[in-house]
Image (cartoon, rainbow, N blue to C red):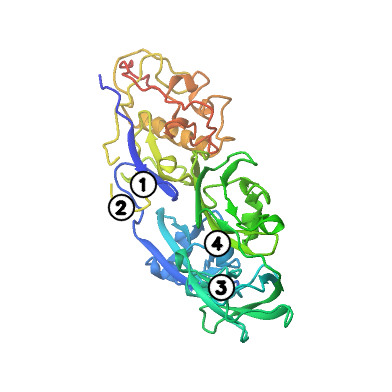
Amino acid sequence: MAGRQRPRRRRAGGRVLLAALLLLGLCCRAAPERIRYAIPEELGRGSLVGPLARDLGLSPAELPARKLRLSAEKQYFGVSGESGQLYVSERLDREEMCGEAASCSVSFEALLHNPLNVFHVQVDIHDVNDNDPAFSKAALGLEIPELTLPGARFPLETARDPDVGSNALLTYQLSSNPSFSLALKESSGGKKQPELVLERALDREEQSSFQLVLTALDGGDPARSGTVQILVNVTDANDNAPVFTKRVYEARVRENVPVGSLVLHVRATDADAGSNARVSYGFGNVPEGVRALFSVDSESGEVRTAGALDFEEKSKYSFGLEARDGGGLVAHCEVEIEITDENDNAPEITVLSVSSPVPEDAAVGTVVALVKVTDPDSGENGAVWLELSGEAPLSLVASSGGSYKQAQPNTDWRFSQTQRPGTSGSQNGEEGGAWPNNQFDTEMLQAMILASANEAADANSTLGGGTGTMGLSARYGPQFTLQHVPDYRQNVYIPGSTATLTNAAGKRDAKATNPSGGNKKKSGKKEKK
């Protein structure tokens, strides 16, 4: 007797889309190469991206028969059924799609039928300089004691520009005034911190206030700009500004921690006395998204979570905090918070296409079904294992690139006398022998495969039959139910999860089902009709 064939596995990297093909044999009709296009953001709907059909090697005459279509979670693009041109179907805002990431792209699959092929397409979205630098307020107040010595520096708020690359590199200019000048201090990541420099001693009795204009310019061509007013109030002696204990505070926190969890504690001291030494803490010019996720206690300097952290959405946050004393002097520090990944996403299996019915004389390598597996977690948490279990003449092949189960399919389909399926009215146990043993039995076997594949793709299958019969009882008799054959609806699953073709949601709390194969006794000879 033949022993049970070991499950066939193939590993795929996490945080990428994984497509798999179920094949009748060893050949794979999926193209490993990736077709790439590049377009600027903010193109209008209907704008041309590229000649997709031509790049796939198709002529216009072939398009109707090959049925070119796209498979994507969000349809940013469409394809013309007549010309095969790829075009923009939704507004593309790079900052909205990818935030401050250095690169931005959209990936999807192009599917061809007759025969079934899959091609991987990537469209890179390039940034355009469509955002002005902006300050958090229209005016900034600054108090400087009249006894402050020339050369003293006062850090100013930085502007923000949601563009990326050179379009987000900011420089600053200060309106002309003999008492002040502007210095730019380079901080981590190449950012420039503007500082107001006192050029000569101040006399409150001579002039008690100054009004300056700070302009931020980005690196675009042409450059875009934003301004803020600097209101300087000359005060009596507050000799010392607050000083943070660190220039950069760093912390790591798990995603999904409860709201209100302590992340880190910043601290600044002031050498003055009384109200001039009283320090309060707050945010600098930070995005609204940071304020929605973190809070800072104005008295203690504790930074806590204010919203749900999601590693898959963003893995690192960097923002500025300020400490202000009672006399109006301000110090700045940087906070860098790294979000660590938790295994909070189950793999999801999506059936993209199922070919049914399959002719009995289908060639080895014919594509039966195309499925896609995704897991947005990262690292080991996002690594996906695919297994095709049970005894079936199918192999599972990754189609996301590279070259690789393929192992020989197990063709030993022998059943015991009590397990052997038969047509309506047939009797088991006449003679021993392997099954299938003729063309009619082969047809029966193919029907079983198709029925299990169809039920996997559609839990409400209407192929016929009652509950638990895999839709076969109407043709092969009421005595032939699921207890006679292994449950091939479980043929694709993820170890440690119950994600299968019939359970794309994949509840993490349930146990994975591994149908038993084992050795089979030889069945009796099939009854002839």
Amino acid type of the residue tagged 3 in the rendering: Ala
Residue 474 makes an appearance in the image: yes
- The residue positioned 30% from the left and 28% from the top of the image is 6
- Residues 476 and 240: in front is 240
Which one is in front, 40 or 186? Answer: 186
Residue 402, disc: 2
Check residue 398 in the rendering and tell me which mark sits there, or answer none: 1
Position above or below: 387 against 149: above
- Assess disc 4: are there few (<14), some (14-19) or many (≥20) residues with their C-alpha within 10 Å of its C-alpha: some
Q: Earlier in the sequence, mark 4 or mark 2?
A: 4
The residue carrying mark 4 is: 99
Question: In the visual, does 3 lie left or right of 157?
Answer: left
| Element marked by disc 1 | strand
Residue 91 percent across, percent down from the top left = 60, 68
Q: Nearer the viewer, mark 4 or mark 2?
A: 4
Q: Earlier in the sequence, mark 3 or mark 1?
A: 3
Q: Secondary structure at mark 3?
A: loop
Amino acid found under the numbered disc labelled 2: Gly
Tell me residue 106's x, y (percent). Answer: 49, 61
Dots 3, 1 in contact, CB < 8 A: no
Q: Position of residue 273 (x, y in %)?
A: 67, 56
Q: Nearer the viewer, mark 1 or mark 4?
A: 4
Q: CA distance from mark 3 to mark 1?
A: 64 Å
